[in-house]
Amino acid sequence: MRNALVRRTVLAASAVSLTLLVTACGGEKADTKADAKPSEAAATSAAPATKAKTTAELAGVLVVQADLPNHLVKPATPAEIAAAAGAKSDKPQCQPLVSAQSMNPVGTAAGTAGTKAVAKGKEPAADASAEEKLKAGLDALGSTVTSVSLHSYEGKGAAEAFATLKTAGTACAGGYTGGQGGDSLKITKVAPGAAVTAGDEALAYTVTGDADGEPMTMELVVVRKGSTLATFSAVSLAGAAEQPKDVVDVQVKKLG
């Protein structure tokens, strides 16, 4: 057992740079540069044009600690926000996925807000052995961390951004490399994730990365509700993140 625990510790250490791609939260100012300009055909033409929410309005419907008792909800640090703003893909067609994983808007958003939700681990028993306490600590380290971001768009911008992400998932199925601040992560596969039924339309991807030779699977969920696009990017230092169903359900409900 001890060897297995040590191996998990090494895996966690090798994946630290990965969290930089998914732990920043939305700032006060929305991004004004589009990742990729969707074509008219790619946009969901049936989606009605709606009025965008402001950053202040989005902050008012963002999940908070009281909404998720089984998670620790906390904002990102200024350093994480600054680092995530520079997240880039080596393939232009995959930039929307990197942006979504980094909590940056796809396209030009009028308002933006975000936070992080860390699943709470199980506390060890009072009479637990030292090894059991070590295992509990490592399990806690491997808890799924979900970055939640809300971006609101004018007109049909949300539907167009959603369509762009849907197209990127297909175009980048074979992988890409995402990087920021001198760190990079090779993505080897993008595949459909467990189906999500929420909002006006939703999609889910399971993204597989190579962290120093160790496979890591991340979950990316995108939900459009009217003029707002909610993205949920989940990662675990243990190597395999769980789709954050509870977080998705609570956040989408707050969107109305």
Image (spheres, rainbow, N blue to C red):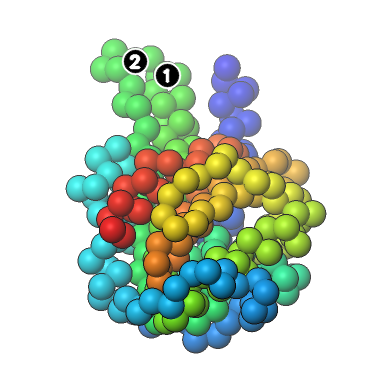
Q: Which residue is mark 1?
A: 132
122 in relation to 16, above or below: above
Camera-nearest residue between 224 and 77: 224
Q: CA distance from mark 1 to mark 2?
A: 6 Å
Quarter-of-image position of residue 50: bottom left
Most extreme residue toward the bottom is 32
Answer whether residue 78 is visible to the viewer in this image. Answer: no
Whether tag 1 and tag 2 are in contact, CB under 8 A, the answer is yes
Rendered location of residue 74, percent (x, y)? 31, 56
Q: Residue 131: percent from the left, percent from the top?
A: 45, 19
Give the amino acid type for the residue marked by disc 1 in the picture: Glu
In the current view of this chain or complex, which residue is farthest to the left? 66
Three-letter residue code for mark 2:
Ala
Is disc 1 surrounded by few (<14), some (14 to 19) or many (20+) residues within 10 Å?
A: few
The quarter of the picture where the C terminus appears is bottom left
Q: Which mark identifies residue 128?
A: 2
